[in-house]
Amino acid sequence: MPPDFEFGKIPLNLKHHPPTSPPDPAAMSTTKLVDIVSELQASSSSPPQKITSLLSSAKRELLNLNALIPTPTTSPQVLLLARQTLETGALLSIRLQQPDAFTRYYQQLLPFYEFPDSSYQTSNSHLKSQRSKVTGLYLLLLLTKGDYAGFHTVLEGLEVEQAGKGKGLEGDEFISYPIKLERWLMEGSYDRVWGATKRDGVPSDEFGVFTEVLVGTIRDEIASCSEKAYPSLPIASGKNLLFLESEGAVVDFAQGRGWAVKDGRIYFPQQQEDMRTEKEILVASGQVIENTIGYARELETIV
């Protein structure tokens, strides 16, 4: 018997230790999610591939937490991290010019936007909601698609919500921007739309992606109406009518649509024997602009 052995005493190496509790999977996923979202915040100017990879990792952790669809039992911390992840994905989709992906992110964010601000963790004040920007971009996307009924449906919901808070939408730069564009389009004030789509007129770079599409849509509609309105048009008039930067751009646009360009004029392929004078064409152009996209018809449908 070893000399240091005594009856009634258990050697230190034989003493009973309580079993170690297994790690909490939810706590582990939350910790990982915090790290990933922090890295996302620090990687806003990183290559899209890196941000996309981080978003995929964040969404895996959200799946582990059953937090991609929020519930009243979702913790304020996870609620905040999930919203931040989806908003980052939505804005990245805009920069990558992926409107379908952006729409999916927007739809995923809607349940999160139904929760009051008090439901979110407030200690991470740097993770502010980007709801106004995302919603404003979605409204602008609807305009570019010509979905005016959808545009007004979203807008009416926002107006009701803000009225309940005693606020309006005019003071929100991201929401008021598509509202102004839609109003000017209905009025036929295309010069104001054109001015608002310049770099210094958009509320953020993301809006510039959709405004280019919107101007392209307007330009195509004006071109279609021009083809029906008269047989030819001076290139100089086409520059202003189509909101193009130069006469060379007019020629390129005309050739892209199969128009003939000769002696400083654009000739439209239409079956009309009567030839109008330049003065008549310039007078007619004002009427063409007013009748372009058919906003009056869409408005009647909405009303």
Image (tube, rainbow, N blue to C red):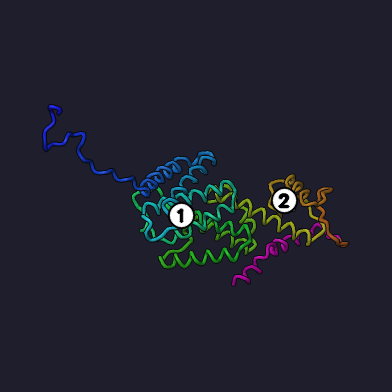
Question: In which quadrant will I find the C terminus?
Answer: bottom right
Relative horizontal placement of residue 125, taking residue 101 as reference (left or right) = left
Q: Give the range drawn in magenta.
A: 275-303
Percent x, y of residue 160: 47, 68
Q: Dividing the picture into quarters, in which one does residue 273 lie?
A: bottom right
Disc 1: CA contacts within 10 A as few (<14), some (14-19) or many (>=20)? many
Q: Dividing the picture into quarters, in which one does residue 277 lie?
A: bottom right
Say if the magenta span includes residue 139: no
Which of the pair 148/120 is nearer the observer?
120
Percent x, y of residue 270: 83, 59
**Position above or below: 127 against 190:** above
Percent x, y of residue 215: 65, 54
**Position above or below: 167 against 197:** below
The disc labelled 1 sits on which kind of residue?
Leu
Instruction: Measure the C-alpha gap from mark 2 to mark 1.
Output: 49 Å
Element under disc 1: loop
Element under disc 2: helix
Residue, disc 1: 68
Q: Residue furthest top?
A: 3
Nearer the observer, disc 2 or disc 1? 1
Question: In which quadrant will I find the N terminus?
Answer: top left
The disc labelled 2 sits on which kind of residue?
Lys
Residue at (44, 48) in percent of width and height:
61
Relative horizontal placement of residue 273, taking residue 126 as reference (left or right) = right
Residue, disc 2: 239
Relative horizontal placement of residue 36, taking residue 107 as reference (left or right) = left
**Main secondary structure found in the magenta portion:** helix
Which of the pair 44/292 is nearer the observer?
44
